[in-house]
Image: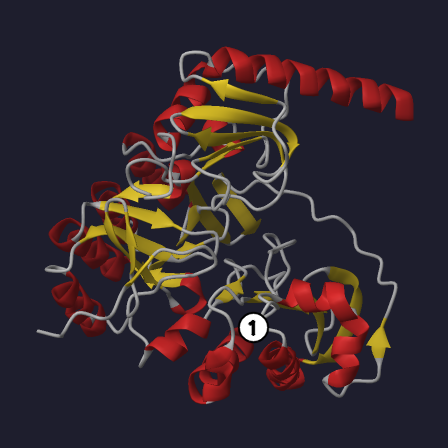
């Protein structure tokens, strides 16, 4: 049996892993990172069993498409680590694990309209493992590889993003906080370019530890300066960025006549071990090879036929997972809250489920970013602004309109008894403002 890895009490700005789990309100949080966010169905079944055996049977899917075991204890952790190692799901060391944060388009390699990014993924994973100086990057530092196609990554909070261009031999590199400044390189040079940029960030951070993410350096010096210091002269400026439309990401997806995808949402990013096992078994019965985890708190199951999609979606529906794009749970972001999180000041998941069940959404557009229910001001479930944000405050809620958890509230001390009516009124208000604004612009 392996000795238990070191774990540290939670602090803001720190990301756990499997080799360095984090203490939370319901035990240790053990985060597993999959290569290209893909997991074989048989492995998913094993993970469901491990969650029950060594945790509390609850798993969370993070915004970086990582799966998190909850409720692990000091006593069960060593056996869980051994089991994850047997499944080849562990990095060699904490340093490699902490920096292997790579988001990849979930349909890369399946969607014929998406570029093949496998070589870039493999090369980037290798360099993050072998170039130990890169282990000095902050644990939240993230890389994104956007293959385009039917389900592009679009806007993410990744520090460095590689976006494939129409020409499969070219890609564009952008930095968080400056989408209008870019570097175009050959795909064969993409990994080397990313490493040079990361080295510049590390050099600045060695003298300015307050630079926690790339956006901090970009805000201070500018993206063009970072590119020049990385050794690149041919920088593209004033890039016109087209907002990425939110495509349908739940239910039946068909990126081509021969490609069939069952897209399944996890309510508030959470799945039980029983649900995961049933989904994996249904996928295996339909002869599906793998599950693809997405940064949208959903799982894509590549299927052979339209009938196989029906089979997988039916199993997911009966398990209580989200298979309908009009499900109101998709419009609500919520963190674990009490009692799972030691920082939580409200039972966010219970309250989010109540809002999804009882609110009237008929006059608003159901889309991500409508409502954010946060257990505290850290806002772990969503960094971006939402129309309505609720922040837990000693068992009550503060209400924020068109802001983040750090925006001053317009109302405080809302009890759970008044929560539905208060949010309903806020939805009506924001809907009227939206209609009025559209009328004025017209």
- Is 216 displayed left or right of 318 in the figure? right
* Residue 379, image x, y percentages: 51, 43
For image coordinates 41% across by 56% down, the residue present is 11
Secondary structure at numbered mark 1:
loop
For image coordinates 36% across by 62% down, the residue present is 16
Local crowd at mark 1 within 10 Å, few (<14), some, or many (≥20)?
Answer: many
* Residue 435, image x, y percentages: 78, 19
- Image-quadrant location for residue 153: bottom right
Task: Report the front residue among 85 and 201.
Answer: 201
Q: Compared to 27, does 77 lie above or below?
A: below
Q: Quadrant of the N terminus?
A: bottom left
Task: Report the front residue among 120 and 311.
Answer: 120
For image coordinates 39% across by 36% down, the residue present is 267
Q: Quadrant of the C terminus?
A: top right
Q: Can I make out residue 164 in this image?
A: no
Q: Can I make out residue 168 in this image?
A: yes
Q: Compared to 343, does 432 lie above or below?
A: above
* Residue 333, image x, y percentages: 49, 36
- Residue named by callout 1: 117
- Image-quadrant location for residue 186: bottom right
For image coordinates 32% across by 80% down, the residue present is 93
- Is 73 displayed left or right of 213 in the figure? left
- Is 78 displayed left or right of 303 in the figure? left
Q: Compared to 263, does 351 lie above or below?
A: above
């Amino acid at each position: 049996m392996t000795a238990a890895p070191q774990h540290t009490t939670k602090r803001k700005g720190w990301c756990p892993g499997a080799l360095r789990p984090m203490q939370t309100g319901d035990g240790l949080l053990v985060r597993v990172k999959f290569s290209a966010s893909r997991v074989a169905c048989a492995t998913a079944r094993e993970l469901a069993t491990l969650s029950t055996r060594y945790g509390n049977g609850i798993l969370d899917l993070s915004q970086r498409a990582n799966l998190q075991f909850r409720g692990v204890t000091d006593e069960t952790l060593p056996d869980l680590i051994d089991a994850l190692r047997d499944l080849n799901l562990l990095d060699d060391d904490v340093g490699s694990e902490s920096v292997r944060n790579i988001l990849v388009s979930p349909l890369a390699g399946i969607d014929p309209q998406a570029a093949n990014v496998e070589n870039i993924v493999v090369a980037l994973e290798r360099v993050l493992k072998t170039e130990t100086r890169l282990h000095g990057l902050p644990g939240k530092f993230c890389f994104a590889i956007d293959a385009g196609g039917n389900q592009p990554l679009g806007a993410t909070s990744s520090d460095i993003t590689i976006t494939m261009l129409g020409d499969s031999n070219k890609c564009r590199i952008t930095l968080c906080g400056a989408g209008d400044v870019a570097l175009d390189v050959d795909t064969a040079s993409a990994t080397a370019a990313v490493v040079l940029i990361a080295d510049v960030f590390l050099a600045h951070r060695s003298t300015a530890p307050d630079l926690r993410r790339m956006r901090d350096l970009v805000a201070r010096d500018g993206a063009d300066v970072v590119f020049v210091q990385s050794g690149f002269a041919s920088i593209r400026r004033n890039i016109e960025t087209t907002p990425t439309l939110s495509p349908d990401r739940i239910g039946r997806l068909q990126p081509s006549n021969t490609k069939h995808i069952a897209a399944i949402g996890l309510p508030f990013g959470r799945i039980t071990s029983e649900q995961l096992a049933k989904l994996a078994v249904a996928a295996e019965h339909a002869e599906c090879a793998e599950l693809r985890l997405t940064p949208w708190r959903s799982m894509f199951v590549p299927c052979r036929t339209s009938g196989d999609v029906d089979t997988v979606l039916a199993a997911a529906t009966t398990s209580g997972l989200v298979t309908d794009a009009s499900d109101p749970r998709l419009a609500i972001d919520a963190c674990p809250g009490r009692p799972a999180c030691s920082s939580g000041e409200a039972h966010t998941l219970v309250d989010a489920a109540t809002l999804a069940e009882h609110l009237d959404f008929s006059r608003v557009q159901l889309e991500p970013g409508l409502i954010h229910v946060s257990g505290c001001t850290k806002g772990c479930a969503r960094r971006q602004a939402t129309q309505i944000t609720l922040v837990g405050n000693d068992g009550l809620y503060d209400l924020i309109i068109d802001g983040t958890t750090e925006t001053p509230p317009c109302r405080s001390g809302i009890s759970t008894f008044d929560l539905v009516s208060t949010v309903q009124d806020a939805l009506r208000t924001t809907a009227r403002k939206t209609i009025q604004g559209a009328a004025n612009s017209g």
